[in-house]
Amino acid sequence: MNLTDVIRRPLITEKTSILREDGRTIVFEVASGANKVEIKQAIEKLLGTKVAGIRTTISHGKIKRQGRFAGQRSDWKKAYVRLRDGEKMPEFLEGA
C-alpha cells in the first residue's frame, strides 16, 4: 500500500478544529485496511513530523433512502494523530 493510499484526507469539522487548537492533534480519514504502524509511517514521511500516538475509529455508514429505495454508505476509518512535544503542525493544516 502506497503512503498516499493510506491517508485519504484531513478531516476538518468543528470537533477536529477544537482538537487542533492544542497544536498537537490532527485527524485524518485513512484507508480501512491500514493499521497504526502504516498510518504512523505515512504521516512521518509525508508531513515530516514525529508521531507520539495514534487512535483509530471505524465510522459505520448511514442507511440512506431515496423514495422507496434504500442503500447504505460504506464504512470508513479515521485516525487521531498526536504529534510529539516540540513538533510543529504542517503549515497547510494551520489555517484550515
Image: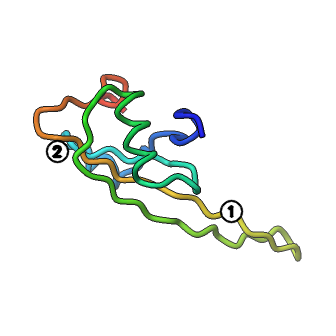
Judge from the rendering whether residue 22 lies leftward or rightward of residue 34; answer left or right. left
Q: Secondary structure at mark 2?
A: loop
The tag earlier along the polypeptide, 2 or 1, is: 2
In the image, farthest residue toward the bottom: 68
Residue 29 % position (x, y): 50, 48
Mark 2 highlights which residue? 22
Judge from the rendering whether residue 90 lies leftward or rightward of residue 76; answer left or right. left
Residue found at x 26% / y 41%: 51
Label 2 – label 1 distance at C-alpha: 31 Å
Q: Nearer the viewer, residue 3 or 12?
A: 3
In the image, farthest residue toward the left: 86
Q: Residues within 10 Å of mark 2 (few under 14, many from 20)?
A: few
> Which quarter of the rendering shows the C terminus?
top left
Residue 80 % position (x, y): 35, 53
Which image quarter: residue 63? bottom right
Which scheme is used to colour this image of the protein? Answer: rainbow
Q: Nearer the viewer, residue 58 or 91?
A: 58
Mark 1 highlights which residue? 74
Which image quarter: residue 49? top left
Residue found at x 41% / y 53%: 36
